[in-house]
Image (cartoon, rainbow, N blue to C red):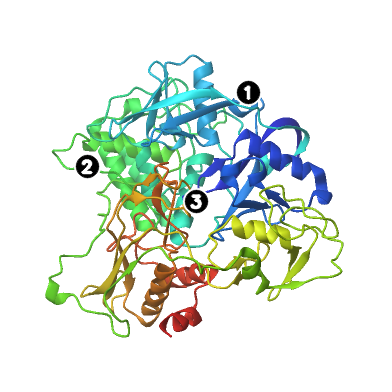
Amino acid sequence: MLLASAVVVWEWLNEHGRWRPYSPAVSHHIEAVVRAGPRAGGSVVLGQVDSRLAPYIIDLQSMNQFRQDTGTLRPVRRNYYDPSSAPGKGVVWEWENDNGSWTPYDMDVGITIQHAYEKQHPWIDLTSIGFSYVIDFSTMGQINRQTQRQRRVRRRLDLIYPMVTGTLPKAQSWPASPGAAAAPPAPPCSCPQCVLVMSVKAAVASGSAGPLHPSAARKNVAPPGGAKVPPAPGAGARPLESTGTIRGPVKTVPSQAVRRQASSALAGATAGAPASPPGANGKTGRVALATLNRTSLQRLAIAQSRVLIASGVPTVPVKNLSGSSPVNPALAGITGILMSAAGLPVCLTRPPKLVLHPPPVSKSEIKSIPGVSNTSRKTTKKQAKKGKTPEEVLKKYLQKVRHPPDEDCTICMERLTAPSGYKGPQPTVKPDLVGKLSRCGHIYHIYCLVAMYNNGNKDGSLQCPTCKTIYGVKTGTQPPGKMEYHLIPHSLPGHPDCKTIRIIYSIPPGIQGPEHPNPGKSFSARGFPRHCYLPDSEKGRKVLKLLLVAWDRRLIFAIGTSSTTGESDTVIWNEVHHKTEFGSNLTGHGYPDANYLDNVLAELAAQGISEDSAAQEKD
């Protein structure tokens, strides 16, 4: 614990492992509930401060954000930052997305940009914190180092985030220097997609000396043919001393034999060159780059690669080592030494090839799936049953409680013995009526449950805000489209004994309906048709049948804001992971993945879809 002052920023974790900040107003609202203590209850209704967040409730007990209409859970955290940084001054940095609206940067990125802005630097390179962008303050533009695409950025003033003074947990203290982000906690789920992005984010944010995944490491290597942007002031890799030595830990390998091999390789590479002078701590063994010629650099890089491969240490491939490449072996060798000095193991070979699609398949080779009828399915909007008022729908799931306990209603945070505290559009039921959900037994104001139902999909189903038990048949807001499925005569990595089920989703752009975020406004549909893959095993066919149920219930996709591109009003995945990479697993969305089928079954169960659901749909 340490005694300090800090600004508090409440943040939520998206599916790509990035902590996204709530606005200052929302953070103030959450903080007020926290400071009110047990009397305020254990939940925060975000719609009370921002109408756009009406479906969301934060459960402070489990530190999760719950979306009432979809049942989606996301971790939240209460993070601390330096009062002199951007959130302590009410400064928000944003970039313009494809729709012309503005998206705030992650908090650690915004702090880094603001720090450079205050130092009156002409620009800032974000490579050092894991993003391949340059911010040019003279033009107020963001430049992608790889594609050279430019976007506008802006700096605006907002409320200052809430301030706290006192004893703060070390694990939640703000970064010691601008741009250094606190390492995120455990990932929200155990699937390889989430584990991958969380590990990459943690490695980049904390400057870890451990192995780094290729997708993250490549952000730190200038792309061939890219813009020649000089390193930003105060940013970049570890600095060189005046003698040309690199300061940083050297990755060690557990095997004694490998240590000896590495030592002999290093000795051979540096033969004939004077050793670097020891630093103040008396440690020796640093390599003086200025004293190594091209041949020595190549020998050292190749020897290092062999040591890493022999030891089984995960390696980061460096691209383009062919003779025609602008990245020649000498530069690749320097890159390897720089990265290993920073604690990143490097293998100077070509990277594995990304295999998104299977080899070409003729129509005669495509077969229907045994036990599954048809080979495609379309969806259109399903209307809720007419004549059913919210009160009539909820009556099926509730038992009236004449003598409610002296507890809080976790929706409005008022005592159950008092009238509901909901302040929105007035339901027709009395605000002091209390009901108990029949299966899970949780108790709420009926007034609050009706308001929650009206704020959701109004499909005749209800999901308990506390335990997420689903009453009725939950449906989503997926726009109309087509789902095709068939067998192809190829095997997935990790499943050599069976063929592959290929699923093709096709959704066209269109106009949002009344159940969508912005009714009447157009929505985009990027990346369609989307190809996904399952093994043609017993469990793979089971997953397919349940995905068909999810498709019919409009739960596979939704319309919202893309966490990848920041684009709003676009078709996005809806919390059911799919494998879109056929012959590799470089992105985390491919095979082999021993736990994927079990994980996706659990995700479907959370949406109320099980084997019983499939049987009911068949009947």
Instruction: Point out residue 581 in the picture as x, y percentages from the top left corner.
Output: 31, 60
Q: Earlier in the sequence, mark 2 or mark 1?
A: 1
Image height check: is 205 above or below 83? below
Coordinates of residue 596 in the picture (x, y in percent): 43, 68
Q: Disc 2 marks which amino acid?
A: Asn
CB of mark 2 within 8 Å of CB of mark 1? no
> Does residue 421 sit above or below 3 in this rendering?
below
Is residue 546 shown to the viewer in this render?
yes
> What quarter of the picture does the C terminus occupy?
bottom left
Query: In the picture, which quadrant includes the N terminus?
Result: top right
Q: Residue at x 24, y 32 (%)?
A: 294
Sequence-earlier tag: 2 or 3: 3
Tag in front: 3 or 1: 1
* Crowd rating for badge 1 (residues with CA inside 10 Å; few <14, some 14–19, many 20+): some
> At x 49% / y 39%, what residue is drawn?
249
Q: Secondary structure at mark 2?
A: loop
C-alpha gap between disc 3 and disc 1: 29 Å
Residue 181 percent across, percent down from the top left:
56, 37
Q: Which residue is mark 3?
A: 198
Q: Which residue is mark 2?
A: 320
In this rendered view, identify the residue nearer to me: 265 or 169: 169
Q: Residue 53 appears at what percent x and percent y? A: 58, 46
- Looking at the rendered structure, the secondary structure element under dot 3 is helix
Residue at left offset 61%, top offset 60%: 453
Query: Does residue 368 appear to the left or right of 182 in the view shown?
Result: left
Q: Please, is residue 466 above or below residue 85 in the view?
A: below
Disc 3 vs disc 1: Cβ atoms closer than 8 Å?
no
Q: Report, in whole angstroms, how far the alpha carbon at label 2 lies from the one at label 3.
A: 28 Å
Which residue extends farthest front? 387
Give the numbered dot on residue 514: none
For the residues labelled 2 and 1, the Cα–Cα distance comes to 45 Å
Amino acid type, mark 1? Lys
